[in-house]
């Protein structure tokens, strides 16, 4: 029984350390993190494609001699 209490206390200490560390490092509450992640994922990408543009017919783009 005492081992179970030690494990629970250890996990609680780790969880509180993560919460406090996030608040200490960023100055924001960890409760705002899920909203920030959703906002970041739902951002619109660039209007134009960032993929390279290939010509459909390379011979057409070659200069004629």
Image (cartoon, grey):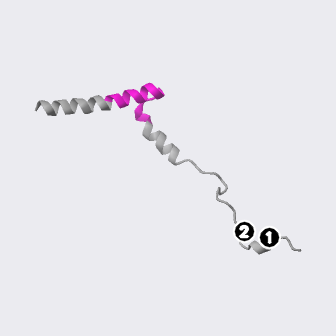
Does residue 27 lie above or below 54 as drawn? above
Q: Looking at the figure, which quarter contains the N terminus? A: top left
Marker disc for residue 45 = none
Q: Which of 41 and 62 is in front in this view?
A: 62
Where is 43 relative to 21, above or below? below
* Residue pictured at 87% horizontal, 74% vertical: 64
The residue positioned 52% from the left and 44% from the top of the image is 40
As drawn, is 43 to the left or to the right of 53? left
**Residue bounds of the magenta highlight:** 16-32
List the single residue furthest toward the front.
Answer: 65
Q: In which quarter of the image is the C terminus?
A: bottom right
Residue 50 image offset from top left, x and y in percent: 65, 55
Compute the Cα span from label 2 to label 1.
Answer: 8 Å
Check residue 23 for magenta coloring. yes
Residue 37: percent from left, percent from top: 47, 42
Q: Spot the residue most to the left.
A: 1
Element carrying mark 2? loop
Q: How crowded is mark 1: few (under 14 residues within 10 Å), some or many (20 or more)?
A: few
For residue 14, which quarter of the picture?
top left
Q: Which residue appears at 37% of the width and 30% of the height?
A: 19
Q: Is residue 12 above or below residue 58?
A: above
Mark 2 near mark 1, Cβ–Cβ under 8 Å? Answer: yes
Q: In the rendered view, would you say 51 is above or below 63?
A: above
Where residue 4 appears, as percent x and y from the top left, is 15, 34
Residue where numbered disc 1 is placed: 61
Secondary structure beneath disc 1?
Answer: helix
Tell me how many marks there are. Answer: 2
The residue indicated by pointer 2 is: 55
Residue 9 drawn at (x, y percent): 22, 29
Does 54 appear in magenta?
Answer: no
Viewer-nearest residue: 32 or 62: 62
């Amino acid at each position: 029984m005492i081992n179970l209490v030690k494990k629970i206390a250890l996990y609680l200490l780790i969880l509180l350390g993560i919460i406090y560390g996030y608040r200490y490092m960023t100055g924001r509450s960890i409760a705002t993190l899920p909203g920030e992640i959703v906002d970041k994922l739902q951002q619109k990408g660039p209007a134009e494609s960032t993929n390279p543009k290939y010509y459909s017919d390379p011979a057409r783009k070659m200069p004629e001699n």
